[in-house]
Amino acid sequence: MVLLNNKSNKYQLQATSAQLSESWFKKISIDWKKYWPLYMMVLPAVLFYLVWLYGPMWGSLIAFQDFSIRHGFLGSPFVGLENFIKFFESPFAFRVVRNTVMINFWNLVFGFTLPIIFALLLNEIRNRYFKRVVQTITYMPYFIAVIVVAGLLVNFTSSDGIFADITVFFGGAPTNLLARPELFRTIFVGSEIWQFMGWNSIIFLAALAAVNTELYEAAIIDGASKLKQIYHVTIPGIMPTIIILLILQVGSIMNLGFEKIILLYNPLTFETGDVISSFVFRRGIENAEFGFSAAVGLFNSAVNFAMVIIANRISAVLTETSLW
Amino acid sequence: MAKSTLNFKIIGIVLAVVLLAVVIFFVARPAQEQVVEDPAQEEPIAEDPADPAAQLNWDGRPLPAIGRDTNHGRPFNPTEKVNWDGRHERFLHGVNATVLPVVEDPVTLTLWASFTSPIMEGLHESYFFKELEARTGVRTEFVYPPVGEAVTNFNMRIAAHDLPHIFVTPPPYPGGEWQGVVDEIYLELTPYYERGLMPNFSWMRNNHHLFAEEIYRDTMDDEGRIFFWPKVDVVPSHPWSGLWVRTDWLEDLGLEMPETIDDWTHMLRTMRDEKNVAPLALNVSLWYGVAYNYMFVSSFEAGYDWINKDGEVVFGPTLPGYRQWLELMNKWHAEGLIDPDFPARDFAGYNAHIAGGNIGAFGLAYGEIGPILTAGRAIDPDFSAQAVVMPTSYAGQVIRLRQNNAIVRGRGNREYFTTRLVDDGLDDIAVVWKDYWFSQDGGDLASYGPEGVSFRWLPDGEYEWIFPRLFDEEEGLDFWTIMPQFKVHNWAYLRNSLAYMMTPEALQSIEIWGTQSADWVMPDHLAFTPEEEAELAGIMVDVNTYRDEMTLRFIVGDEPLGNFDAFVSTLEDMGLARATEIMNASLDRYFARGR
């Protein structure tokens, strides 16, 4: 929560910046002499970021080149925005971007709110033993590998699988659910929720534990019912956590790992299931188009970046809480 | 104290003297003189130039006389096939134009190959490579990419120029195979060929009694350049994938083998009614599906991909026959004759479903039938299947499309030399060594293994496997697992493609499917310029996605068949006309390759 930029600290910051502007070099050298062990401890982390996260950014250059492995960065010809244009000219570009955004949006709406609700419910449980058992069971699916989950899903959704049996029980006809494009998002988001709800609720539970109990007592004295307490005390109490996580989630709106998509989709569900990463994956095998893949990745990152900044601004204006 | 310093002094002086003596001994030792006999300076056997014995080998050694037991125990004969062990005529395919050993002083070649085996640590354990080394004097060392990471490893090696001497069946080179030569990774072989260092390969291209023309065309590119070593199936195994039917079900239901589309419809309906299952296991884009073996689509004279219709390249899905095929599939699917889970099944699921006993007819590769029969019989002891030819859709139709293997196998079965051979000065040796694999003896060694160790010739001219581990009942390993211990499979050599222990069903399937022609199948070895290649790939990646998607939608009924014309015009909007142009140009250049 040190990251928070609450308005109350603004004057303090202004004061220190006035001090610093005096002679920053002198300030830094005094600071260093006094606190050099702390700087030493931070140094590996800073180096890590520089070398492994900032350094490889240089590789984005590939997106603007007709990259050939043999010639490397310096030998491949520069082609400007050609790779980006190639992506947008593809007849499937719109569909692919739309699918990515839609699946992520549904993931956000359901996959983000459900852990919060789940944490709120768990918080109300008095029996500690029961609470722990439920928690453990719900976050176990997190540890199952994607390929196993996909294998289970393919099995359950086949025309002789569990879902088909249930449908038959209620009088319907058994069909293969993965062959229906309209169900792809539901199945995908559903499996994401099943796998990650327990794990994602942990951080909310931690935030809930930090809400001041005196506020609850004050609310009870004022005559608030359970629901009113949750609405007026609990949720505002964990609002900073929710906002931060929401902004971070929005910042990956264009990223959707292709592993699960590839395992679940088939040509019948390309209409709703083909996302940017799987589209580029297929294209990549065709001709090892490194420039193309890098361009699409850069496009993704640019959009994500813009989304994070917008989300941060909106949240700063609306709720006085923001990442920076 | 004085005493001890004196001792140290003496020890130090003695050590120094000893060291000095050692240094002088090793450094100043006179170099051994090597007496090199220059063979060219021996009295020249200047006789009749047509007499091979008068000529010299590529390294200056005199050629041995022609005949038996004259070439280190192997028959040397560069001009005709020789039957020296009583084998049947149909096992003779090449000459023996290599003088053994290839080198007097041993050299080592480094080979990059993807290889894993549950019973061997590496290929150096193989009896084949041991015998090859004994015969040729060339030692082979292997480097293996991590399992599943062949593409990454390959790309890394190209980028870092960290090359082995030979790449064995590498992944596709980014930009096309010829780009590898341009980038100075792959070594072009044409100069060595023209210098006469590949006599076996040359004989095969020019003199094979059945397939010389095809081999000639398929081993070079449009400009006549040779730059890869191909896998040449001189004993052809043309089709390896096609349609199968459960013969025990046919017996139960009193049906005959289906020959026409109507027969099939009737058979599938009967199976559905009597056995209460969806009897046809359909696969569209996996390697034993429509995309590879044209099942049913060839009955309507269309194809899933490019076809060579009487010399002109056409994209199958644009033909009216494709619409008829879609209508048939749609009808069958609506009637419940096709497995409803077919879009979502992968290899393992597909095979398991067939073995499970709920399928009456399926498309399959013959290599898979063995394990499926075993698994199927565990559940239903009567499980038996037989291959069946493609059905006809009208009387008198000639089927022209089925899965086919060219004699010179496709791009995934090539070996490439690298420029490191030139750097290490081993290029001539490597070329002659690899050319040995295309001689009669070299090809035999690679196809069957060392004689007397893995196989032997029988008095009646046939051969039989004798490798003891093949018959070990306790271990119970199958042929394909043990095979790398004594022979090679997907390497570049003169290959007898039937030199395996195959189930009788598999051998029968080759015969049955082989009765239909494959005239319209596209040749495997078309060549494109890098620009054409890039353009074609760019168009086809979208076309293929759209076709895959729409085909399934038509079959399943999500898309009404009335929209077929819209489908074709969308394909054309994606640039299909230009792609067809490129393909036709390439095919014309392909057939223009000649001698």
Image: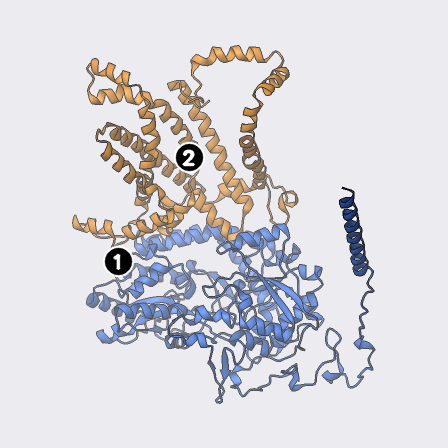
Secondary structure under tag 1 reads helix
Question: In the picture shown, does residue A176 fall above or below B60?
Answer: above
Residue B223: x and y in percent read 65, 64
What chain is tagged by disc 1?
B
Q: The chain shown in orange is which? A: A
Mark 2: secondary structure: loop
Q: Residues within 10 Å of mark 1 (few under 14, many from 20)?
A: some
Which is closer to the viewer, label 2 or label 1?
2
Q: Amino acid at mark 2?
A: Ile
Q: Residue at x 43, y 36 (%)?
A: A254
Residue B193 % position (x, y): 68, 70
Look at mark 2 in the image and give the residue it sits on. A253
For disc 1, the marked residue is: B334
In the rendered picture, chain B carries what hue? blue
**Disc 1 residue type?**
Ala
Q: Can you see residue B550? A: yes
Quadrant where the N terminus of chain B lies? top right
Verify CB contact (< 8 Å) between mark 2 and mark 1: no
Q: Is residue B414 left or right of residue A124?
A: right
Label 2, label 1: how far apart the Cα atoms are: 40 Å
Q: Is residue B128 above or below residue B85?
A: above
Residue B136 position by quadrant: bottom right
Q: Quadrant of the C terminus of chain B?
A: bottom right
Mark 2 Cα shell of 10 Å, populated few (<14), some (14-19), many (≥20):
many
Q: Could you tell me residue B79's position as x and y percent?
A: 65, 82
Q: Position of residue B442 (x, y in %)?
A: 59, 76
Colouring used for the render:
by chain
**In the picture provided, is B593 more to the left or to the right than A293?**
right
Up the image or down, B141 lies above or below B135; here it is above
Q: Quadrant of residue B260?
A: bottom left
Q: Nearer the viewer, residue A294 or A66?
A: A294
